[in-house]
Amino acid sequence: MSYDDGAIWTKAEVRGSRVVLRHPVGDGFVSLRARSGDTAGNAVEQTVIRAYRIVATG
């Protein structure tokens, strides 16, 4: 995950089939990157810059 349009990437916590993201305080955007591979050497990677917006409440 990235909170600065992909300049810095941080690994997210994976719990089973779920991903846990800890958002920073304030407004902003979240970019996501996923990678997967198999034992035959096949791999895929997908990046979505500004996948969704964070709007601070309260």
Image (spheres, rainbow, N blue to C red):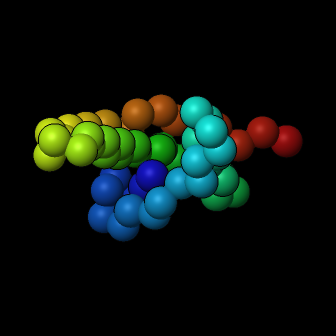
Q: Could you tell me if residue 49 is visible in this image?
A: no
Q: Residue at x 26, y 41 (%)?
A: 38
Apparent side of residue 23 relative to residue 39 in the rendered image (left or right): right
Q: Residue at x 46, y 63 (%)?
A: 10
Give the answer, above or below, for where 1 lies relative to 52.
below
As rendered, which of 10 and 18 lies closer to the eye? 18
Q: Could you tell me if residue 10 is visible in this image?
A: yes
Q: Residue at x 58, y 33 (%)?
A: 17
Residue 37 x/y as whole percent: 26, 43
Apparent side of residue 3 relative to residue 48 in the rendered image (left or right): right
Name which quarter of the figure residue 45 lies in.
top left
Q: Residue furthest right?
A: 58
Residue 58 x/y as whole percent: 85, 42
Residue 11 x/y as whole percent: 47, 60
Q: Residue furthest front?
A: 39
Q: Residue at x 34, y 53 (%)?
A: 5
As rendered, which of 12 and 29 lies closer to the eye? 12
Q: Residue furthest bottom?
A: 8
Q: How many marks?
A: 0
As rendered, which of 43 and 13 lies closer to the eye? 43
Residue 21 x/y as whole percent: 61, 48
